[in-house]
Image (tube, rainbow, N blue to C red):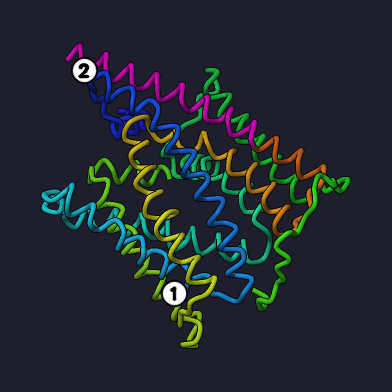
């Protein structure tokens, strides 16, 4: 069986009553818009907290602990019997998912955010599907079928996204004065500083809440080990009633706990391609709010690069979606014959 066929196994067709289908049709896109709004707000809060001196791994540890506490009641209420399916294989996938999705991804992301700005970080969040695609090719988990249009569009979209990212880095152009900026007047005082993993985990452990809770808990433990190694000062781990605590609570509840649940729900219904289709929304909102509130300059070259990233992302997602649809039809035909 091909890799595309295996990937479609994470999406199980579910027949729903008419009212439930209508609710799902409206709720799915709304939930993804909410995910993007959560992402924008936590991005700005995290930037402010990091600027105020918070250590990246301290934020990751507390954020995922909060998410674990938030999701735990849902796991025990709605998936009481699912914990019995836990075994060493499942725990291994959860640990691996936490390592790449929490410890490494969030760690690198926060260090990058600390050194740059919110808009710059949002641009590279849109490259996650592209990076995943490149890694999948390197490890031979996916092949590029250049003989067909979907394969060509995937490759063209990936190259366009990379070109847009390079343009953002190298080409500034004219400074655009679009609106009053730096409304928060917040200064920099700090010292110098999924969807495929989730889809794979869903195959071996089809749980929405337990998988989220255990991934957050595992990621928090791993990040704590790394964080203690990097920062021995107890003052860095001490929380106060300030912006840093607000960032931890908000990001843990909304951007980690609720977001993981909403994304896993969308993936289980419409596949791993659906959530990234909304990523450009957070990029646009972040660009505007980052300029308005934090005073980040917007340049013509950066805008052109962002447009290339968005166009390339949708071209890639179109090609990938067509391949998944074709693989799903082929699998259904094989099942009917068998």
Residue identifier under label 2: 335
Mark 2 burial class by Cα count in 10 Å: few <14, some 14-19, many 20+:
few
Judge whether residue 331 is colored magenta. Answer: yes
Judge whether residue 223 is colored magenta. Answer: no
Residue 167, percent from left and from top: 76, 44
Residue identifier under label 1: 226
Residue 59, percent from left and from top: 48, 69
Residue 180, percent from left and from top: 80, 52
- Nearest the eye: 162 or 193: 193
Q: Looking at the image, is mark 1 or mark 2 earlier in the sequence? A: 1
User: Looking at the image, which residue is at 85% across and 47% down?
Assistant: 177
* Total numbered labels: 2
Side of 112 where 304 appears, left or right: right
Side of 212 where 300 appears, left or right: right
From what the image shows, is residue 316 above or below residue 42? above
Side of 126 where 117 appears, left or right: right
For the record, the magenta segment spans: 310-338
The quadrant where residue 190 appears: bottom right
Q: What element carries label 2?
A: helix
Q: How far apart are marks 1 and 2 (CA)?
A: 47 Å
Mark 1 burial class by Cα count in 10 Å: few <14, some 14-19, many 20+:
some
User: Looking at the image, which residue is at 52% across and 71% down?
Assistant: 244
* Main secondary structure of the magenta stretch: helix
User: Looking at the image, which residue is at 33% across and 16% down?
Assistant: 329
Q: Hey, which residue is sitting farthest right in the picture?
A: 174
User: Looking at the image, which residue is at 78% across and 49% down?
Assistant: 298
From what the image shows, is residue 112 above or below residue 19? below
């Amino acid at each position: 069986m091909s890799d595309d066929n295996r990937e479609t196994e994470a999406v199980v067709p579910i027949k729903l009553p008419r009212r439930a289908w209508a609710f799902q049709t409206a709720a799915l896109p709304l939930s993804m818009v909410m995910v993007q709004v959560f992402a924008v707000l936590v991005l700005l809060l995290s930037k402010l907290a990091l600027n105020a001196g918070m250590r990246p791994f301290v934020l990751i540890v507390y954020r995922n602990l909060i998410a674990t506490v938030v999701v735990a009641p849902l796991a025990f209420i709605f998936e009481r019997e699912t914990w019995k399916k836990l075994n060493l294989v499942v725990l291994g996938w959860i640990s691996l998912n936490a390592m790449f999705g929490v410890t490494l991804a969030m760690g690198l992301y926060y260090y990058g955010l600390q050194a740059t700005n919110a808009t710059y970080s949002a641009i590279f969040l849109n490259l996650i599907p592209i990076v995943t695609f490149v890694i999948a090719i390197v490890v031979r988990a996916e092949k590029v079928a250049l003989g067909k249009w979907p394969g060509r569009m995937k490759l063209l979209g990936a190259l366009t996204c990379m070109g847009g990212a390079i343009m953002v880095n190298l080409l500034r152009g004219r400074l655009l004065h679009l609106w009053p900026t730096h409304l928060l007047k917040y200064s920099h005082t700090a010292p110098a500083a999924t969807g495929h993993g989730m889809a794979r985990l869903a195959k071996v452990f089809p749980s929405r809440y337990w998988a989220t809770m255990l991934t957050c808990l595992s990621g928090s433990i791993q990040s704590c080990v790394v964080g203690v190694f990097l920062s021995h000062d107890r003052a860095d781990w001490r929380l106060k009633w300030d912006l840093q605590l607000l960032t931890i609570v908000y990001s843990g509840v909304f951007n980690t706990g609720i977001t993981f649940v909403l994304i896993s729900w969308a993936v289980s219904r419409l596949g791993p391609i659906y959530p990234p289709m909304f990523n450009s929304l957070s990029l646009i909102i972040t660009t505007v709010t980052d300029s308005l509130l934090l005073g980040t300059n917007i340049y013509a070259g950066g805008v052109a690069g962002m447009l290339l990233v968005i166009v390339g992302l949708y071209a890639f997602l179109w090609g990938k979606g067509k391949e998944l649809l074709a693989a799903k039809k082929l699998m259904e035909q094989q099942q009917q014959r068998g």
